[in-house]
Image (spheres, rainbow, N blue to C red):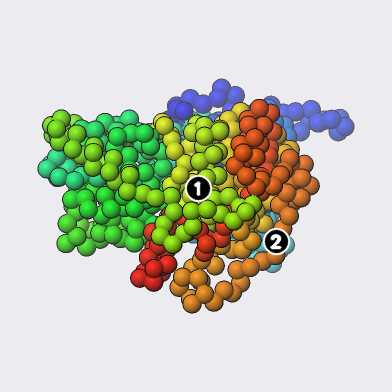
Amino acid sequence: MTDLGSTGPSAVSAPVDDVPGTGGTRPRRGADVLVDALVAGGVDTLFGVPGDTGVAFYDALYHRAEDIRHVLARDERHAGAMADAYARSGNRVGVVEVSSGGGTTYVVGGLGDAYASGVPVLLLTSDIHTRSRGTGALTEIDQTALFSAVTKWTRVAESAAEIPSLLHEALRTAVSGRPAPVALIVPENVLDEPAEDITAVPGVPALPAVRATADPGAVARAADVLSRAGRPTLLVGSGVHVSGAWDVLERLADALGAAVATTIHGKGALPDTSDWSLGVVGNNGGRPGANAAVRDADAVLLVGTRANATDTNSWTGPSRDPRGGATVIQIDIDADRAGRNFPDAIRLVGDAATVLGRLLAHITPVDADVRTERRARVRAARADTADCLTGAPATAADGQLLPADVVRTVNSVLGDGTLVVADPGTPTPNVAAFWRQTRAARSVLIPRGHGPMGYAIPAAVGVAMAHPGREVVSFTADGSFAMACGELETAVRLRLPIVHLQFTNHSLGWIKMLQHLYTGRRYFGVDPGTIDAVGVARACGMRAHRVRSLPDLTRRLRSFHEDGGPLYLDIEVPHLIDHTPPVPAWDAGRAGTGERPVY
């Protein structure tokens, strides 16, 4: 993609059209200007649900259908998740459109994780007529206030003439600094306003918008710390993916002989086959050896990660206490976030790839014998892991499958180049721990900004739209299925190559596990009735089956691979109480020695 200041599409405004059946022409309106501005900004796909205040916009889309593909979702929250996943997997701005009232309140739920996870999403909303403000009009709500918690920029277009520059600014802001959602609100009268002479502002946003470097003195100091360290370790997050810093990350690790751990968002920053890869760490999917390696490091470089309580295994790796022994260095594009959780850290504010390159130029590579010794240490840390933590059975009941076995089977049959989306609950720690990649890429999406249930089914649609023809795997669970099953029809309508695998344990399993461990096994509000997921999926037009053995799973995955049509597989798994996933705090909880984890 090119920078926003560069030349965009040559035609930045649509011609006036003949309108069939009217005997005349359709005058150009604010809605047409908005569509023109989207095309000029490089937007070719948007997700949305139409409403009363957006009728003119949808009419404008009708006349530019060859330029912008509209994906009709069944719910505005899901449309937001689609745009989020489209943006994450494609490293571009995702666009979602909703109308005033219920559409705006619903879409907020689809933007919370994008905001917390640093994902650039453009929210377009129509609004009531400006003359109706303050009258208690149907669907009236203060949209600017509503979106304040889930966007970093919100503006209202008060005239058609303002639309091109505001849209241009919105796209630029979404990808500048720490990426995040932005919102442009256009009242319905502005969409209807005559706009014959208004043209769009060309320029397609690149991500990252700017390749900023860090303070040279801080870089030199950080390089000296890393060069002198005996146990240097890197903890990396999604900033590596956004920056495309995979190669320089591996070169720096190799020069230092440094172990590399990832957060869930950073999964895939280094291939699992790399000599330096520890895999995912933290308190959700973290492996024992990996957590120990970060905890015992004497210098930890944080790259593009919030490094919150979950990522650091409740602040134990690295410790927030400066007396904990590790010197912390943090690279972040956002000056407010660099060092936020580690005030004594060496702060390197800038683009991940750029700053890593500067560090690589300044560090002193270790000798071959030191590199060999450190490589063996990483190998030992990876080996210090079991599929099941203490107290969990090695086998499942008849007709049940272990989630780890399901993840590994899908990985083996479809290949690690498959695009993966996972819901919270049972899918998250199992996919984080057991899905293996042989190349660096952001091919696994797990929403850990807020951990919203019901994300994976609609998000898989967004991923499939971002990568036409690529196979997509959606790991969901019965609780999340109940929240998002309407979007199965969307996948069928678009005939997307998505296979959904549902882990069914007939409860809100994660919360029930917390009640089991920390509230005296007093289970309350966690046992809804069972829904026939196979029946619902078939009612949406999707092929669906219950799978009760790994050979049957393999057969159905191979069939999916051959024909590519959407498929739903319902898989009974043990409850988390009976088979503990890789959640380190729960291992201690089962032994009666741990407290509820800090988030």
Report which residue position mark 2 lands on: 530
For the point 55% across and 25% down, which residue is it? Answer: 9
* Circle 2: residue type: Thr
Horizontal placement of 30 versus 153: left or right?
right
Tell me which amino acid carries mark 1: Ala
Residue 524 in view (yes/no): yes
User: Which label's residue is closer to the chain start, 1 or 2?
Assistant: 1
* Residue lying at the far top of the rendered structure: 10
- Frontmost of labels 1 and 2 is 1
Nearer-the-camera pick, 83 or 376 = 376
> Residue 85: horizontal and vertical position, in percent?
54, 43
**Looking at this view, is 455 or 104 the one in front?**
455
* Observer-nearest of 251 and 58: 251
Q: Residue at x 72, y 31 (%)?
A: 63
Quadrant in the picture for residue 465: top right
Residue drawn at point x = 59 percent, y = 33 percent: 471
Whether residue 99 is situated above or below residue 6 in the rendered picture: below
Residue linked to disc 1:
404
Disc 1 from disc 2: Cα separation: 23 Å
Q: Quadrant of residue 413?
A: top right
Picture coordinates of residue 289, whole percent (x, y):
31, 50
Question: Looking at the image, which residue is at 63% across and 49% down?
Answer: 571
The residue closer to the viewer here, 290 or 103, is 290
* Rendered location of residue 325, percent (x, y): 17, 57
Give the image quarter of residue 366: top left
What crowding class fits label 1: few (fewer than 14 Cα within 10 Å), some (14-19), or many (20 or more)? many
